[in-house]
Structure formats: C-alpha cells, structure tokens
Amino acid sequence: MAVFPPTGSSSLELTISVPGFSSYPSLPNSSDQEEWMTAGMEDEEDSSNGSGPPRKKLRLTKEQSRLLEESFRQHHTLNPKQKEALAMQLKLRPRQVEVWFQNRRARSKLKQTEMECEYLKRWFGSLTEQNRRLQREVEELRAMKVGPPTVLSPHSCEPLPASTLTMCPRCERVTTTTTTTLDRDRDRGGPTKTNISSAPATTLSSKVATPAL
DNA sequence: GACGTGTTGAGTCTTACGTCA
DNA sequence: TGTGACGTAAGACTCAACACG
C-alpha cells in the first residue's frame, strides 16, 4: 500500500529540535559542567555497587548536544571507533555516547510513528467523508432509477422505457442504459444495452486519492 | 514550595545475528 | 552440514533526575 510519502529519508531527515536547549535555560555554567563531566567520567563503577550516593543526572552542554545531533544526522549508528572518537571529542564516556544514540534512535522512531499515526488519522477522515459522498450519490442515482423516464422516443414521441443503472464491472463506472424500441426491435435475438449517458466519470469512478496532507 | 508534566540520561531485558566448536 | 553455546549490537521498556509552568 503506497500510503506514506517516501520514507527513505523521512526518519533520517526528521529534525527534532532539541527541547533541552530552550527549556533548560539555566544550564550548568562551564565550571559546573566541567565538574559534571568529570563526575560523568569517573563514576563508571558507581552505579554497580549501589552503595554510593545517588547518581546525578548528566546534562549535556549545548555544544555536546550540537555535536551529537550533527553526528546523528550523518549516521544513526556508530561503530566502535566512531563512538570512541566522539566520546573523546565530547569528553564523555563511550557508553554515554552509545546511550545517547540509542535514545535518539528510539525517540526519532517514536516521533516518526506519531507523525504517521496523525497522517493515517487524517487520511481515514478524508476517506470517510469521501465514502459518505459516494453513498449519497448512489442513493441519488437509485432514486433516478425508480423515477419515470424522461427520454422521449424521437420517432413516436412516446416515453421510452425506464432506463436502468448498471455498474460496469470493468471500469466501475455507473452507466445509465435505456433500451429503446429500436433496440428492442433489434434485440429480438437477445438483450443488448446501449449506453446513452454515463454518470460523470469524476464521481463514482473517481479513484480514491490520497489526501494532500 | 508542592505538584503535575515533559524531557532525557541510563539500566535492564529481549531479540536477532554472526561465529565457532 | 546441522546444531547448540556464546558474544554482541540494537531495540523495547522502564526508571529516575531534572526543568518548567
């Protein structure tokens, strides 16, 4: 089902602003950050023994986040060398870089999924509306079918037999067919139908189009 | 200042895949 | 060649610290 726009790049190109930048105006100052990073580099085993003080949450600096984002735009996964180099550059542990990328991938995917969900919801709404319109149209056409014929025979000036609505199985166009007396004369051998007018091709036959979203 | 909520770094478990005996 | 054990990487799920309104 060709539902989505080309997603080859969508998830990759999905630029998610880093909310931390705007929502955390009171980032640690540089000296705090230095202490931060030092702590980050040193407490490598702290988390395992559980006896020490509760681990403080690392907050990346703007520059660290910027570099990580930049790197993420280039590739969503890192090989060990890249990880090591980036960690060195950022003065972080490779594990922290790795975790950052893991979370970044997960949250990109989440964002992408949410966007696709929204897209499908809107499309569903559009299709529902289109379905309603078509149902109405079918009702109208059915009403026309029961009504008296309005076509008079050019020969006798008498009303022609009731026209019939049929659905062409191949092109799914509603066709109004009227069997004329001439037809009947000719049809002694078997029934044929003359397509004298067809419903606008843009109505029932219109292809279901994806919404322009 | 307490509280609810969103963000985000990190831990743990699961799964898929490759390698090797 | 098929198979089970093992290691590894990535994802899924979750928690907790923190910022903000």
Image (cartoon, coloured by chain):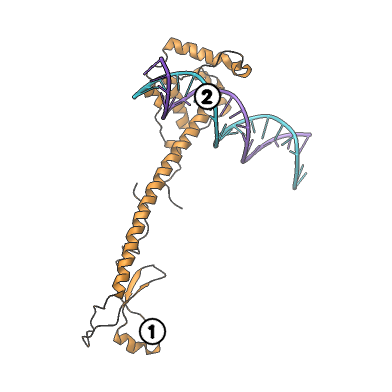
Chain colours: A orange, B purple, C cyan
Amino acid type, mark 1: Pro
Q: On the picture, is B21 further left or further right than A74?
A: right
Task: List x then y, in percent, for residue A137.
Answer: 31, 64
Q: Residue at x 47, y 28 (%)?
A: A71
Q: CA distance from mark 2 to mark 1?
A: 78 Å
Amino acid type, mark 2: Val
Q: Which residue is mark 2?
A: A97
Task: List x then y, in percent, for residue A65.
Answer: 44, 23
Q: Looking at the picture, tell me which residue is in the foreground, C8 or A80.
A: C8
Which of the numbered marks, if any, corresponds to residue A191? 1
Q: Looking at the picture, tell me which residue is in the foreground, C15 or A119.
A: C15
Q: Chain of mark 1?
A: A
Q: Residue at x 41, y 32 (%)?
A: A16
Residue A9 in sight: no
Task: List x then y, in percent, for residue A28.
Answer: 42, 14
Q: Looking at the picture, tell me which residue is in the foreground, A97 or A149.
A: A149
Quadrant of residue A201 within the rendered picture? bottom left
Packing grade of label 2 (10 A; few <14, some 14-19, many >=20) is: many
Q: Residue at x 40, y 89 (%)?
A: A189
Q: Chain of mark 2?
A: A
